[in-house]
């Protein structure tokens, strides 16, 4: 079904690409029939086309150095997509092949999710992938990469600059909140085989599953890890902490499958776009792997796209409570359109909507229990580009339905084991984190009324616990080595039950 559904999507969308090519050629052919010319004029703004051709010819004729026609045209296409939104982009053949590898979970690089910044002066780290060279080197979500091997990002043309032969080294120049100036980090590339699912027992009967990304085998691996935890718990879990922190998304297929495995009924997600092929609705089918055991979802500012879909589906259906911070807010669907020369266009074609009908775009998922990281010296003096880590801060982002509401604040990245302890406490006894926070507030000295006046409400923010959970070795499942048949794509015109293959949402660059 996966191949058929992808083929249906491409067959529906490729005529639009073909039509665009035909209408662009029409003025050059000089149609004789008035009706043909009127039809073309109604579709293509001829004056704007002529303006583009004039500029194109001026560059070819007068630029200080000769410019290759192919390079000039590719630059023009990239510029066309760059001003649409941060997630629409043009891939040449090499970049398109590298992008396709993300669904398979195996490639040579450093293991980090990146977001190209519109000004092309830096790459923003969405998240380092667990147990990869980037994570081991200490690269953090929110870091800005401003140079690679001493070369400024603006001077690097490829969209996958950090990929390379396993064993080779690359030097990254980073800007990080709390650091007074840029600093270098040396990372050794290796073959990245992403294990998207890890699990362990936090306490007898209480399980923990970490989803680091959504790829082709994530759904099947999730089922295996649930079965392993249940066996360790003697047949049934008392509860589960589902960790989606710094999960940048991936295949919507996998997120829908995980949601369906935890829901007996109800809507999971819907997508809406300008054309009917982008509209779909995915509902759960009977069967809850946990048999009703409570679930707490742990999320933060690095949780984006498909991970927000999963968190929204479980929360809106009353299946789980969300603990952490406001998520990233990437509520759009991208479709990869292959071109006849091997290049591809990744185009935003739809928006996600949670079961309650709310758009994720630029607002994200607001947790039921809000956590904050430990405040560090100098945080108040940092520029907004480093402290506000969200879709809403990306230049050119799609406007969210509830964007700009009073009191909006981007979420925080929540590393470490403290948030896991808070999620476990909330899982075992709902409201316990809030009770602890109130108790801590009551112990504060009464000699600081000014600080109390500006403090956040007691039920709004808590600090993660300092104790560490019991150390157990995560159970791991090796990802499948075969490449999935489908490409990341938008939703089909006729939605299928969620147990079948769903469309896919693309993730950011993964070098």
Image (cartoon, rainbow, N blue to C red):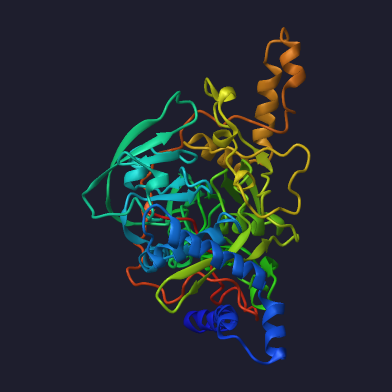
Q: Is residue 187 visible?
A: yes
Front-lying residue, 298 or 69: 69
Q: Position of residue 29 (x, y in %)?
A: 56, 85
Q: Residue furthest left?
A: 167
- From the viewer's perspective, is residue 229 above or below residue 342? above
Count up the numbered dots. Answer: 0
Front-lying residue, 408 or 67: 67
Q: Residue at x 72, y 62 (%)?
A: 355
- From the viewer's perspective, is residue 28 above or below residue 474? below
Q: Residue furthest front?
A: 62
- From the viewer's perspective, is residue 302 above or below residue 484? above
Q: Residue at x 68, y 75 (%)?
A: 275
- From the viewer's perspective, is residue 329 above or below residue 38? above
Q: Position of residue 17 (x, y in %)?
A: 55, 78
Q: Residue furthest top?
A: 447
Q: Quadrant of residue 30?
A: bottom right
Left/right of residue 240 with respect to residue 452 in the rendered view: left
Looking at the figure, which quarter contains the C terminus? bottom left
Q: Position of residue 457 (x, y in %)?
A: 75, 28
Q: Is residue 334 visible?
A: no
Q: Quadrant of residue 404?
A: top right
Q: Residue at x 66, y 63 (%)?
A: 351
Front-lying residue, 128 or 480: 128
Left/right of residue 406 with respect to residue 418 in the rendered view: right
Q: Position of residue 445 (x, y in %)?
A: 68, 10
């Amino acid at each position: 079904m996966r191949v058929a559904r992808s083929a249906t999507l491409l067959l529906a969308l490729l005529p639009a690409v073909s039509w665009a090519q035909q209408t662009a050629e029409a003025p050059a052919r000089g149609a004789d029939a008035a009706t043909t010319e009127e039809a073309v004029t109604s579709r293509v703004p001829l004056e704007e086309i002529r303006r583009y051709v004039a500029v194109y010819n001026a560059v070819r004729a007068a630029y200080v150095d000769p410019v290759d026609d192919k390079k000039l045209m590719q630059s023009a296409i990239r510029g066309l997509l760059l001003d649409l939104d941060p997630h629409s982009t043009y891939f040449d053949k090499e970049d398109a092949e590298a992008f396709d590898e993300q669904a398979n979970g195996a490639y040579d690089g450093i293991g980090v999710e990146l977001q190209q910044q519109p000004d092309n002066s830096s790459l923003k780290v969405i998240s380092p992938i667990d147990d990869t060279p980037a994570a081991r080197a200490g690269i953090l979500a929110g870091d800005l990469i401003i140079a690679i091997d001493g070369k400024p990002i603006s001077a690097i043309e490829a969209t996958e600059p950090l990929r390379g032969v396993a064993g080779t080294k690359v030097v990254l120049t980073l800007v990080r909140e709390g650091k007074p100036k840029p600093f270098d980090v040396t990372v050794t590339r290796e073959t990245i085989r992403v294990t998207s699912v890890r699990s362990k027992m936090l306490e007898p009967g209480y399980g923990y599953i970490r989803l680091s990304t959504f790829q082709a085998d994530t759904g099947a691996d999730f089922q295996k890890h649930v079965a392993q935890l249940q066996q360790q718990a003697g047949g049934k879990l008392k509860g589960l902490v589902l960790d989606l922190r710094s999960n940048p998304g991936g295949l919507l297929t996998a997120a829908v499958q995980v949601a369906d495995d935890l829901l007996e009924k109800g809507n999971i997600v819907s997508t809406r776009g300008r054309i009917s092929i982008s509209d779909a609705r995915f509902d759960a089918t009977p069967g809850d792997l946990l048999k009703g055991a409570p679930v707490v979802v742990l999320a933060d500012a690095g949780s984006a796209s498909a991970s927000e879909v999963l968190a929204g589906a479980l929360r809106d259906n009353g299946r789980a409570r969300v603990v952490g911070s406001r998520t990233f807010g990437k509520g759009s669907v991208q479709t990869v359109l292959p071109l006849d020369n091997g290049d591809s266009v990744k185009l935003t074609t739809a928006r996600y909507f949670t079961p309650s009908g709310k758009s994720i775009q630029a607002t994200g998922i607001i947790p039921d229990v809000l956590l904050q990281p430990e405040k560090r010296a100098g945080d108040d003096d940092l520029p907004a580009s480093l402290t506000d880590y969200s879709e809403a801060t990306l230049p050119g982002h799609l406007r969210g339905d509830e964007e700009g509401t009073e009191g909006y604040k981007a979420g925080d990245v929540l590393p470490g084991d403290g948030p896991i302890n808070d999620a476990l406490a909330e899982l075992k006894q709902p409201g316990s984190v809030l009770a602890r926070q109130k108790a801590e507030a009551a112990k504060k000295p009464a000699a600081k009324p000014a600080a109390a006046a500006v403090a956040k409400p007691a039920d709004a923010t808590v600090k993660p616990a300092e104790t560490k959970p019991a150390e157990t070795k995560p159970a791991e499942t090796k990802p499948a080595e075969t490449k999935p048949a489908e490409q990341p794509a938008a939703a089909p015109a006729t939605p299928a039950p969620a147990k079948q293959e769903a469309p896919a949402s693309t993730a950011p660059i993964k070098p």
